[in-house]
Image (cartoon, rainbow, N blue to C red):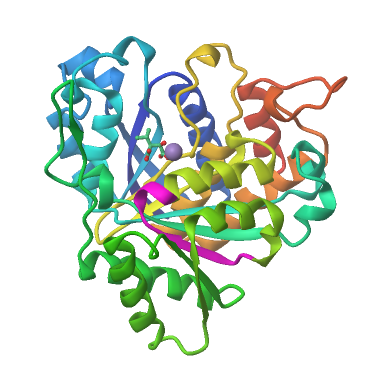
Amino acid sequence: MSRYRIAVLPGDGIGPEVTAAAIHVLRAAGDRFGLAFDLSEYPIGAAGVAQHGDPFPTVTAAGVQQADAVLLGAVGDPSLDDAPRHLKPETGLLALRAHLGVYANLRPVAIHSSLAHSSPLRPEKLVGTDMLIVRELTGGLYYGEPRSNDGRVAVNTLRYTCDEIERVTRLAFRAARGRRGKVLSVDKANVLETSQLWRQVVTDVAGDYPEVMLEHIYVDYAAMRLVSDPGSIDVLLTENMFGDILSDEAAVLAGSLGLLPSASLGDGPGLYEPIHGSAPPLAGKDVANPIGAIASAAMLLRHSFGQTEAAAAVEAAIARALAEGARTRDIAQEGESALGTRVMAEWIVSRLP
Ligand code: IPM
Ligand code: MN
């Protein structure tokens, strides 16, 4: 029996519900594959502010360092919208990412054939859609100094070093090698110096991966390409801010933001979270889609623990539940009845191979 330590950070809004669903499936998969999990829970976001006056409390910072991997729900609470930056839930998430040094954020976007009609795009446009967005996660505008806002003038800094670009690029090329062998690097090199450096470093790194085909495109055209020809994209590599925007756009292809998982990787413990937010209006109602969180747990099994079979089993169970008609509210068509968060998790558990 292999034992693993997981730090669980449920966070805010629907975070606790979808995290509980993910843990339920994780434990069931663990039973099948002989894996035991020691879970420790820590607050983050508004929950951190409520308990410790800090969106990234020191107890959480210490806790995640002790873990083999971190599973996170979501952060964000409207009551803190006007709070100073050091008390915003989002500041807690950015501090966590920096603390773990998770510089590469992997956001896979694949279409479940049974959901092809949930996307506003015509199903024939979606044929072949299976991409991996690799977003740089610990640099760029989110972290650049100086930053300020005196009420009349506001400043943010977009800064990238060669090393920051190189490490995430290598990860994207390694991922492409195990997929369709294509990297689409997205930048704004016609305007921004940081993008010119990005393009130069990506081109240099590509020399070490001759079997991977590299294409550079500007971010405005990438936004169009994502919806006009998504099937042509294999690995999409980009910087922090562009990746934030393009990954929400790509979620439209899958049919719902609630379906998509993510893995954030660095040199220490990995961080796994659904890409959706805390969705305050849905919180506590048992209506949120837990699939993004459950699929994030599958990524955790694969990337942090090397448990490929268990990961594939969870993904297969999600696909089966969807193929057999399991729908939460966000993906139910008119006239279809919707399952709650817990029942959806139950459907997935009972379809584990
Ligand atoms: C995401 C989220 C975060 C981000 C927010 C909550 C800070 O939108 O993970 O995409 O912008 O990175
Ligand atoms: Mn986002």
- Asked whether, in this view, residue 345 is left or right of residue 152, the answer is right
- Asked whether, in this view, residue 105 is left or right of residue 40, the answer is right
Q: Position of residue 256 (x, y in %)?
A: 65, 35
Residue that appears at 78% across and 58% down: 127
- Residue 237 drawn in magenta: yes
**Ligand 1 visible in quadrant:** top left
- Asked whether, in this view, residue 45 is left or right of residue 1, the answer is left
**Can you see residue 34?**
no
Residue that appears at 70% across and 62% down: 231
The answer to whether residue 3 is above or below residue 204 is: above
> Which of the pair 267/66 is nearer the observer?
267
- Residue 200 drawn in magenta: no
Residue that appears at 82% across and 27% down: 333
**Can you see residue 351?**
yes
- Asked whether, in this view, residue 138 is left or right of residue 146, the answer is right
The answer to whether residue 221 is above or below residue 113 is: below
> Which of the pair 132/53 is nearer the observer?
132
Q: Position of residue 324 (x, y in %)?
A: 83, 39
Q: Which residues are magenta?
A: 233-242
Q: Position of residue 16 (x, y in %)?
A: 44, 23
The answer to whether residue 249 is above or below residue 198 is: above
> Which of the pair 100/81 is nearer the observer?
81
Q: Position of residue 92 (x, y in %)?
A: 24, 31
The quarter of the picture where the N terminus appears is bottom left
How many numbered marks are there? 0
> Which of the pair 261/64 is nearer the observer?
261
Residue that appears at 59% across and 36% down: 257
